[in-house]
Image: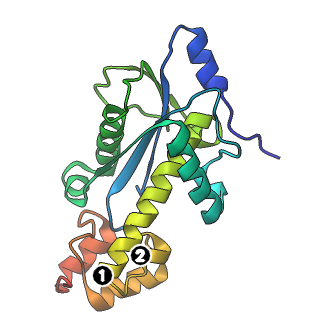
Amino acid sequence: MSQAPDLAFENAARARGFRRVAGVDEVGRGPLSGPVVAAAVRLDPAKVPAGLNDSKKLTAPRRTALFEEIRAVADVSIAEASVAEIDALNILEASHLAMCRAIAGLGEAPDHLLIDGNRLPRGLPISAEAIVRGDARSASIAAASIVAKVWRDRLMVDLAQQHPGYGWDRNAGYPTKDHLLALQNLGVTPHHRRSFRPVHNILCQGISISR
């Protein structure tokens, strides 16, 4: 049985003299539509919500409950990079842009960052470390993954109401079979990432932009 994320990375950073340690994660690198969303979370070591884990390992109701609890007891910031920015920069750079925006939005500036993945955003003015599979290892990163996931899922539900037929309320913009079929039948919306191959291919076929 895999171990749940804990405060080992946070405690190690504090042992090195850091006092305001924040976890950072993003959601939405793989979808064909919608923005990429990042969250930064600085937990209070005395008020860590029970049951934090990689957002993908939690049920939707559990994620929602933790989302509310995290926002109630921690310093939380959420930010996005738009579809236009994804297409202009590439998805990795846009993800890092969203992360930097989330970090900048925290109520109190952190002095050390724990960032999910194997690469750090360029030009960070703050001490930081990249942690592979950080959302399954660090409580702060797990909290950020939950916040970003719930926020983006809600955003995609709202967009699904504006653009019915693509199933975004169910697939969150990922390239599922029903989403790809809808792209063929309904065309490309302003919320689709034109630099992603399936969308680019549809545009090259001359399918009109829907609504």
Q: Are marks 1 and 2 in contact (CB under 8 Å)?
A: yes
Instruction: Read off the residue under disc 2.
Output: 168
Q: Which residue is painted at 64% across and 42% down in the image? A: 136
Instruction: Read off the residue under disc 1.
Output: 163
Q: Which residue is painted at 49% across and 50% down in the image? A: 147
Give the x, y percent position of residue 190: 20, 72
Provide the secondary structure element on which disc 1 rests.
loop
Name which residue type carries label 2. Answer: Trp
Name which residue type carries label 1. Answer: His
Looking at the image, residue 111 sits to the left or right of residue 98; the answer is: right
Looking at the image, residue 26 sits to the left or right of residue 132; the answer is: left
Provide the secondary structure element on which disc 2 rests.
helix
Give the x, y percent position of residue 66: 60, 51
Q: Earlier in the sequence, mark 1 or mark 2?
A: 1
Q: Which residue is painted at 42% across and 57% down in the image? A: 28
Q: Which mark is residue 189?
A: none
